[in-house]
Every structure is written in C-alpha cells, then in structure tokens.
Image: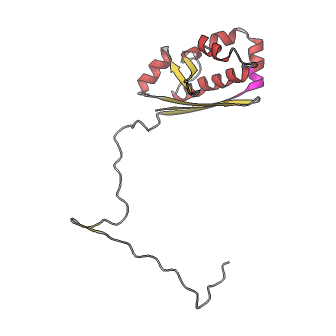
C-alpha cells in the first residue's frame, strides 16, 4: 500500500489536451489514423519459418546415410563447406535453412526437393537463398518478392530463420 502524500506535497494534475489551430480549424484530438493498404506491402511478411538442428544428431545421420549430403545439398553448398575442418555444423545450419524456408513457404517435407533450396553466400558473407523448381514455383504463387535468411550454429546447435516478403 502506498502511503498518502504529505498535505503540502505538490500534486500532479493531468495536462490539458493541446490543440494547434490550422487554417481549416482546430486539429482533431488524438492521433491521425493511418490507412491500411488493401493487400500485403513489400514489408509485410508472407511467411516466417524457424528451424533448429541438433548438430551431433545430424552428424550421426550423415554417417549412417552417406548419400544424404549429395542428395540434399547442391554442389555449390558442398563446395562452400569443403575447406572447413568440420563441415557438419555448416551443413546442419543449411539443413535448418531449408526446413525454415519450407515453413515460410507454407509447405512440408516432400512438397519440394531440398536441393531446390540452396544456401549461398553473398560477397559480404551474408547468406541468401536461391530457389529452383517447385520451391521457386511455390514462392511465385505466394507473391514472394524476397526471402531473408539468418543462420547461426555452435558445436551443438544449428538454427535458421527465413522471412518471406
């Protein structure tokens, strides 16, 4: 319980609304509403996907199924990681990106081939997604103008977020 204020303590009084006259008359009270566009704008997300992969579990899957890397990852993705002492965390992050991209596109496993979703690097090092085949068709049908991608990984966990705009 808050103790009562001392009788001689200043009391806050609510401020009176400020009205600035304009040539057309006084300004309306409150904020001016912003019209809502009829459809999505370039900044409006059409889909968001998030995925995380346990790196050691992914390592075991790759060891059990050696053909998985060639089937799931493009030649470009494999080449990007070929020089790493341990490419598995990078592969796991790219796998998470493919799963997150499918979620952002509103589809599940089997709707697109995982190799149709390719993670490449810009010259700046920023990751980007390239879509081909059914993945590109699905994105076009949704009106996707851009896919934003963020990747991260540690020795234990790889994660990706994809925003379809």
Q: Give residue 73's position: percent from left, percent from top.
A: 62, 14
Q: Residue at x 36, y 46 (%)?
A: 36
Q: Residue at x 61, y 85 (%)?
A: 5
Side (left or right) of 125 relative to 43: right
Residues drawn in magenta: 51-58
Q: Give residue 165's position: percent from left, percent from top.
A: 46, 32
Q: Residue furthest bottom?
A: 7
State which quarter of the image contains the N terminus. Answer: bottom right
**Residue 77 against residue 56 in the figure, above or below:** above
The quadrant holding residue 32 is: bottom left
Q: Residue at x 41, y 35 (%)?
A: 42
Q: Give residue 57's position: percent from left, percent from top.
A: 76, 23
Q: How is the image coloured?
A: secondary structure
153 is within the stretch colored magenta: no
52 is within the stretch colored magenta: yes
Q: Which residue is nearer to you in this view: 2 or 128?
A: 128
Q: Which residue is nearer to you in this view: 140 or 150?
A: 150
């Amino acid at each position: 319980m808050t103790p009562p204020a001392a009788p001689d303590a200043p009391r806050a009084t609510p401020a009176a609304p400020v009205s600035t006259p304009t040539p057309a008359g006084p300004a309306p009270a409150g904020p001016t509403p912003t019209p809502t566009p009829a459809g999505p704008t370039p900044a409006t997300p059409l889909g968001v996907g998030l995925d995380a992969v346990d790196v050691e579990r992914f390592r075991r899957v790759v060891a059990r199924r050696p053909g998985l890397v060639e089937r799931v990852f493009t030649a470009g993705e494999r080449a990007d990681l070929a020089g790493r002492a341990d490419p598995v965390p990078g592969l796991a992050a790219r796998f998470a990106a493919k799963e997150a991209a499918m979620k952002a596109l509103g589809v599940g496993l089997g709707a697109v081939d995982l190799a149709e979703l390719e993670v490449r690097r810009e010259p700046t090092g920023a990751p980007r997604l390239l879509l081909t085949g059914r993945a590109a068709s699905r994105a076009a049908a949704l009106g996707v103008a851009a896919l934003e991608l963020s990747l991260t990984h540690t020795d234990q966990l790889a994660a990706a977020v994809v925003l379809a705009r």
